[in-house]
């Protein structure tokens, strides 16, 4: 950790580009890393929070933000936040599932009909239950998760209109048991690939398609290597903001309070940004040549039911977790 503090010597040099200068060297330098481009609201809002935190602590806290997989892919960054090489790292609950099985539960296909339901569940007792499970692996989780969004399928080859179009379809999914099993249940051929490798996997046609929220498809320029966007909205995905437990607990209470307050503010703004993008990006992507279609969810849900997808995951997650989810989603079968 001492080595990070050396980096704070750079603060003085920033004075020439109009950043505030703090006479003292930061007492707490925290590395914040993510898998998302610098221009995505998840990075923009956290950078704003980092600036506010620096000001409000009179320079005692310096949060350094490393976006876009600069410090590794998700699987690697998860190890790093556990070891303390990274201090704070937002990660999809479904990817965290490899370590905390129940953290994938919000990804059960078609669980949340709309955003009010998402936030009621994730900011309510489903979220509390998941955070409790994450605590047990010595990661601190901030109260509210970031929005990633409702996910849609893009392809370079054909539109996906019904579940039958996914038969044998070579699709990238994030590295997560639930994601892999969902697309296997659709009859597709899913490959688990970290987001850091997705653009090139699509470009070199290792896979024909992938699925992500519209904001990511636009900001990570996936439209350059994909032609069709099928608005399946097959799941909602968010990112839990994880901190190394030992590091977090070692911070003084007043410092934790300033960080908590500003991260919570950043999350609120980030959620608004994503909602706005979710409504506006389709037009931009169409202008760039993507072809959109709106599939009926019915064949997708039926295919999953018939394949035993919901039943299998009900067993894995257990009745207690499922009842917390189904309070919001209604019965999933
Ligand atoms: O890896 C992905 O597809 C992404 C960027 O949506 C996640 O973080 C889960």
Image (tube, rainbow, N blue to C red):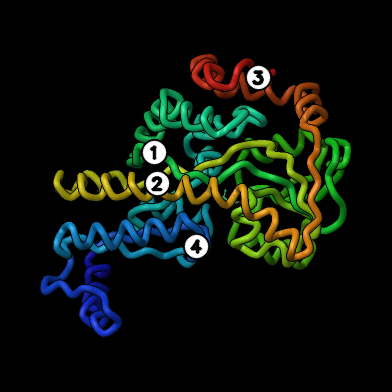
In which quadrant of the rendered image does the N terminus lie? bottom left
Q: Is residue 17 above or below residue 103?
A: below
User: Which one is in front, 19 or 254?
Assistant: 19
Q: Residue 54 placed where, x, y %?
A: 22, 62
Mark 3–mark 1 CB contact (< 8 Å): no
In which quadrant of the rendered image does the C terminus lie? top right
From mark 3 to mark 2, how far is it between C-alphas? 29 Å
Residue 332's mark?
Answer: 3
Quarter occupied by residue 8: bottom left
Left or right of residue 22: residue 66: right
Reading the image, the residue beneath label 1 is: 144
Q: Residue 231 placed where, x, y %?
A: 74, 43
Mark 2–mark 4 CB contact (< 8 Å): no
User: Of tags 1 and 4, which is closer to the observer?
Assistant: 1
Mark 1–mark 2 CB contact (< 8 Å): yes
User: Which one is in front, 245 or 199?
Assistant: 199
Reading the image, the residue beneath label 2 is: 267
Q: Secondary structure at mark 4?
A: loop
- The first of marks 3 and 1 along the sequence is 1
Residue at left 82%, top 58%? Answer: 156
> Crowdedness of circle 2 by 10 Å Cα count: few (<14), some, many (20+)?
many
Reading the image, the residue beneath label 4 is: 72
Number of labelled discs? Answer: 4
User: Of tags 2 and 4, which is closer to the observer?
Assistant: 2
From mark 2 to mark 4, how far is it between C-alphas? 23 Å
- The first of marks 1 and 4 along the sequence is 4
From mark 1 to mark 2, how far is it between C-alphas? 7 Å
| Mark 2 residue's CB less than 8 Å from ligand 1 | no
Quarter occupied by residue 302: top right
From mark 3 to mark 1, how far is it between C-alphas? 25 Å
């Amino acid at each position: 950790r001492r080595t990070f503090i050396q980096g704070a010597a750079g603060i003085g040099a920033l004075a020439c580009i109009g950043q505030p200068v703090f006479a003292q060297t930061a007492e707490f330098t925290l590395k914040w890393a993510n898998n998302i481009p610098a221009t995505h609201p998840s990075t923009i809002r956290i950078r704003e929070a980092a600036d506010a935190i620096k000001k409000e602590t009179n320079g005692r806290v310096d949060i350094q933000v490393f976006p876009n997989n600069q410090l590794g892919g998700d699987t690697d960054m998860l190890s790093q936040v556990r070891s303390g090489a990274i201090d704070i790292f937002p990660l999809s609950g479904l990817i965290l599932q490899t370590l905390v099985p129940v953290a994938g539960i919000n990804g059960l296909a078609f669980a949340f009909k709309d955003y009010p339901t998402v936030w009621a569940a994730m900011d309510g007792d489903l979220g509390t239950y998941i955070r409790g499970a994450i605590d047990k692996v010595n990661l601190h989780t901030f109260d509210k998760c970031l929005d990633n969004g409702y996910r849609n399928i893009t392809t370079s080859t054909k539109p996906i209109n019904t579940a039958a179009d996914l038969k044998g379809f070579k699709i990238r999914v994030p590295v997560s048991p639930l994601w892999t099993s969902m697309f296997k249940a659709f009859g597709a051929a899913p490959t688990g690939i970290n987001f850091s490798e997705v653009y090139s996997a699509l470009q070199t046609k290792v896979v024909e398609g992938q699925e992500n929220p519209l904001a990511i498809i636009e900001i990570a320029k996936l439209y350059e290597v994909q032609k069709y966007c099928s608005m399946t909205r097959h799941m909602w995905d968010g990112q839990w903001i994880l901190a190394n437990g030992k590091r977090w607990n070692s911070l003084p209470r007043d410092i934790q309070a300033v960080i908590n307050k500003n991260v919570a503010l950043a999350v609120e703004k980030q959620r608004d940004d994503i909602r706005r993008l979710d409504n506006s990006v389709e037009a931009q992507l169409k202008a760039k040549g993507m072809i959109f279609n709106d599939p009926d969810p019915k064949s997708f849900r039926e295919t999953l039911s018939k394949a035993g997808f919901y039943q299998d995951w009900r067993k894995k997650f257990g009745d207690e977790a499922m009842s917390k989810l189904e309070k919001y989603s209604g019965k999933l079968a």
